[in-house]
Image (tube, rainbow, N blue to C red):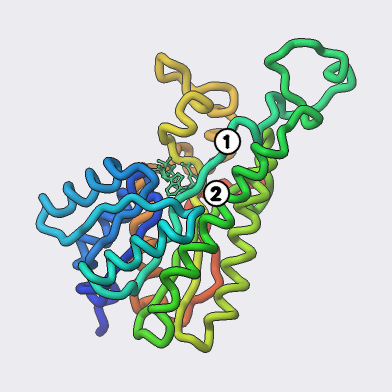
Amino acid sequence: MEKATQDLAGKVAVITGGGGVLCSTMAHALAAHGARIAVLDLKAEAAEAVAEAIRRQGGQAIGLAANVLQKESLQAAHEQITKELGPCDILINGAGGNHPKGTTSKNFLFPEDLNNQQEELKTFFDMDPEGIKFVFDLNFIGTLLPTQVFARDMVGKEGATIINISSMNAFRPLTKIPAYSGAKAAISNFTQWLAVHFSKAGIRVNALAPGFFLTEQNRTLLTTSDGQLTERGNTIISHTPMGRFGTPDDLTGTLLWLCGSGSRFVTGVVVPIDGGFSAFSGV
Ligand code: NAD
């Protein structure tokens, strides 16, 4: 009987956004199964801190500054990774996120909102195209460019795999965040497209779609300063049949499965990891 995750030993895994909350946990999980890790992040210190923690635990890892929106920056990282760890086997496109300028302040538009002079009210009509462009670039172009830079080495390689990070909002958009919802829908679509395109090249492409994980980016949206749930936090929990937010290690089992040979005939899927949120109609 094949051991589905032991085949990660010695593989080189490149993780963008690896200094962040969810992707640093993924980096540790892959390292614990013997993969050699390149942690890439816009913030060099964050990347190095994760790599250093992995090395302290006996794993092999390097941390590098790289901007997923700049091909030259990714090419420089690629060169260093190839020299220090070898060519990439596993690419995790983790860098992503939202921006306040791609967000409306209310769930619904009411006629009276159009005459409201309050500066803090941001309706659909006030949304800044630059904010929307930022979110689409970070999530979509920030997945496309690292794939162009690292997947070339993966063509024809045994066990080559790409994991993109989509989101719940890709299945059905979440209120207030049209740019982030649209950008993650593009990631799910791209995952399917790329899976087909790379199917003859031996590279599998799948995505994780995390539900609601309490992280620094969304903590103030979901909880108050005294740790209670906000109205939005409450709505999420009441629509999550398993009744809680996710924790980063909830992603680990699915990640290891998709990276290992246990999923060797799986490509083009987007796996919800959401405590049942996407299955629940609310009644
Ligand atoms: P995070 O902010 O902790 O991590 C994101 C990391 O990406 C940060 O370390 C940041 O420095 C880095 N980054 C930002 N811009 C970059 C760039 N241009 N180049 C390279 N690195 C860059 O966020 P997280 O919550 O851990 O999210 C990780 C991924 O999971 C993101 O794609 C996010 O959209 C997705 N996601 C998160 C949740 C959630 O509930 N937290 C849910 C669904 C999907």
Res. 6 visible in picture: yes
Above or below residue 178? Residue 154 is: below
Indicate whether 260 appears above or below 271: below
Three-letter code, disc 2: Leu
Q: Which mark is residue 99?
A: 1
Q: Could you say where residue 5 lies in the image, as x and y percent from the top left?
A: 27, 71
Question: In front here: 164 or 95?
Answer: 95
Q: How many marks?
A: 2
Mark 2 nearby-residue class (10 Å; few <14, some 14–19, many ≥20): many
Quadrant of res 134: top right
> Residue 72 location in percent, x, y?
44, 60
Give ligand 1's quarter of the image.
Answer: top left
Q: Nearer the viewer, residue 154 or 193?
A: 154
Amino acid type, residue under disc 1 in the picture: His
| Visible residue check, residue 279 | no
x and y percent of residue 11 in the render? 26, 73
Looking at the image, which residue is at 41% across and 60% down?
Answer: 74
The image's mark for residue 138 is 2
Which residue is at 35% across, 85% downward?
158
State the separation of the CA atoms marked 1 and 2: 10 Å
